[in-house]
Amino acid sequence: MIILAVDTASTSCSVSIVDGTSVLSEYMVNHKDTHSRFVMEMIHTMLAACRLRASDLDGIAVTTGPGSFTGLRIGLSTVKGLALAIDKPVVGVNSLEVLARQVGGPGSYSLVCPMMDARRSEVYAAVYRLSDGKMTCESEPRAVRPEKALQNITWPCIFAGDGAVAYRDLITSTLPELAIVADGGDQFIRAATIGRMAIERFMVRDIDDLGALKPVYLRQSDAEKNLQHAVAT
């Protein structure tokens, strides 16, 4: 089963092609330019590198959020257009769950708290527990101030994502005996992880309705807030 995976949920953009448990190719950029300028080029590059045509794919996976409003729309519109063109199924994957799966709870850290920088002094965050190789959600994804995301964490917890990096000092000072902040590549969403997660769903035919697949924003955009304010006044 050959899966194309795409992520445009944050400042980084990642594309990967996964075949079963093997990663055939992965391409990531992180230079704050709009993803619409290069995501299709990245997809074409990956297909060419693997000597595949789009029609050779068995399915496509994409992050649905939370994340950048513009980035999510770019990723979803790109994947939807491609899926319609080649008539392939699509799976949407939660951005925070991807970050949690990448870290995997090393050592005694049974909790994982992925954090994505949501601007406005907020983060997108959730808490997942790892037990016997399975991951369960203990705190649903939400947009909150970082200090609120740290409340009720009483077990050793590893924090991952660009939000965790941005608020490292707050995390380690608030939970000095319980928290560790992942570094390096764990602050970025990797399309290869998305692909592996998606294969689990494709194998049991747990696919999404393409027409109903929408971004998960968790909060209103500035434009929506301004419109509501204008209507109210």
Image (cartoon, rainbow, N blue to C red):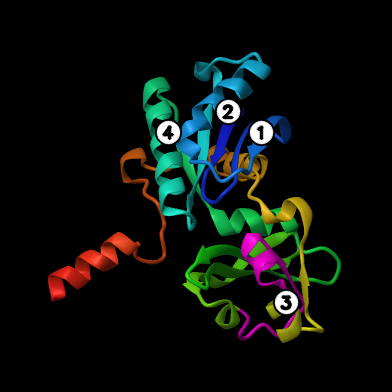
The residue located at (69%, 56%) in the rendering is 187
The residue nearer to you, when weighing 80 against 162, is: 162
Q: On the rendered structure, is 87 left or right of 188?
A: left
Mark yes or no: residue 50 visible: no
What residue is shown with label 3?
Answer: 169
Q: Are marks 1 and 4 in contact (CB under 8 Å)?
A: no
Q: Secondary structure at mark 2?
A: helix
Residue at (51, 70) in percent of width and height: 140
Disc 4 is placed on an element classified as helix
Residue type, label 2: Met
Q: Amino acid at mark 3?
A: Asp
Disc assigned to residue 178: none
Mark 2 vs 4, N-terminal side: 2
The residue labelled by disc 4 is: 78
From the viewer's side, name the closer residue of 209 and 163.
163
N-terminal label among 2 and 3: 2
Residue 47: give x, y in percent of width and height.
60, 20
Where residue 189 sits in the image (x, y, percent)?
A: 63, 49
Task: Look at discs 2 and 3 and give the one toward the viewer.
Answer: 3
Looking at marks 3 and 4 on the same chain, the residue that comes earlier in the sequence is marked by: 4
How far, Cα to Cα, is label 1 from label 4?
Answer: 16 Å
Against 207, residue 44 (above or below) is above
Local packing at callout 2 (Cα closer than 10 Å; few below 14, some 14-19, many 20+) is: many
In the image, the segment drawn in magenta is 150-169
To which residue does mark 2 refer? Answer: 42
The quarter of the picture where residue 74 lies is: top left
Q: Nearer the viewer, mark 2 or mark 4?
A: 2
Indicate the amino acid at tag 1. Answer: Tyr
Residue 177 higher or lower than 184, as above or below? below
